């Protein structure tokens, strides 16, 4: 399991920067409507430029299981992050050799829908390996910079079947320490908080973010 993930990587330079800064995972977004979209071919080039210890996570939004499986093999990917409206049945159709992260937008109902999703997964005998909790961004599927409700996530964490929790949503170098102290997540995920423009990372922001996150994780 990774601890610090830099999501929305679109080029080799930013991927190498993330690895050099100390991140142990990157996110490659295959949602065609995202400002951080990459093709499978570009993703393969990015993945091949990284050290083996850096985890490659593919972000998918309402893709078919067969398409996900093809991309997992061709890039290749270590984890699949389901960030759309996928149902539990999809997990059972995914390759057994890839990890699965189920993303959830924490809205006014908190983590209730996610807990129900996990109950269905248990019945189908294919649980995700981790859950990612993001801010509620309405019709957007993440990467908006909105901050998640930390206090509510911390309060309702016990409903997540003991799965590792990845915290996302509006994290920056300025607030990541407070977020980790408030929620005690197993990992954190950032995209817009370390960018100069969507899809292009800012070296100073990224390095500062990773350093702050590592220090905060060490403290808890």
Image (cartoon, rainbow, N blue to C red):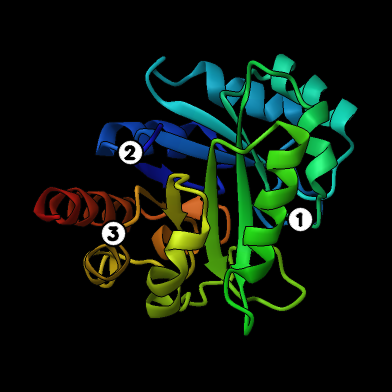
| Mark 3 element type | loop
Q: Residue furthest bottom?
A: 108
Residue visible at 32% across and 50% down? 203
Q: Pick the quarter of the image with the N terminus.
A: top left
Task: Tell me the CA gap for discs 3 and 2.
Answer: 18 Å
Residue with the mark numbered 3? 184
| Mark 3 or 1, closer to the camera | 3
- For numbered disc 2, what is the local secondary structure? loop
Q: Left or right: 208 with respect to 194?
A: left
Is 147 drawn above or below residue 86 in the view shown? below
The numbered mark, 2 or 1, whose residue comes first in the sequence reads 2
Looking at this view, is 13 or 121 the one in front?
121
Q: Which mark is residue 23?
A: 2
**Mark 3 nearby-residue class (10 Å; few <14, some 14–19, many ≥20):** some
Which dot, 2 or 1, sits closer to the camera? 1
Q: Could you tell me residue 61's position as x and y percent?
A: 78, 50
Instruction: Say which residue label 1 marks.
Output: 84
The disc, 3 or 2, on the residue closer to the chain's N-terminal end is: 2
Contact (Cβ within 8 Å) of mark 3 with mark 1: no
Res. 68 image quadrant: top right
């Amino acid at each position: 399991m990774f601890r610090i993930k830099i999501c929305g990587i679109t080029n080799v330079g930013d991927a190498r920067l993330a690895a050099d800064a100390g991140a142990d995972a990157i996110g490659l977004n295959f949602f065609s409507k995202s400002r951080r979209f990459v093709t499978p071919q570009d993703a393969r080039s990015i993945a091949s430029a990284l050290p083996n210890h850096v985890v490659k996570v593919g972000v998918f939004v309402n893709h078919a299981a067969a398409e996900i499986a093809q991309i997992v093999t061709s890039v290749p990917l270590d984890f699949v992050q389901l960030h759309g409206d996928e149902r539990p049945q999809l997990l059972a159709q995914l390759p057994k050799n890839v990890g699965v992260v189920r993303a959830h937008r924490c809205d006014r109902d908190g983590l209730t829908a996610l807990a129900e999703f996990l109950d269905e997964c248990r019945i189908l005998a294919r649980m995700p390996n981790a859950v990612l909790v993001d801010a509620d961004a309405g019709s957007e599927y993440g990467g908006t910079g909105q901050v998640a409700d930390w206090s509510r996530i911390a309060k309702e964490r016990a409903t997540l079947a003991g799965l590792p929790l990845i915290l996302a949503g509006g994290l920056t170098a300025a607030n990541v320490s407070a977020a980790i102290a408030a929620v005690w997540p197993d990992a954190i995920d950032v995209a817009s908080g370390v960018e100069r423009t969507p899809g292009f990372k800012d070296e100073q922001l990224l390095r500062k973010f990773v350093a702050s996150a590592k220090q905060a994780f060490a403290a808890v």
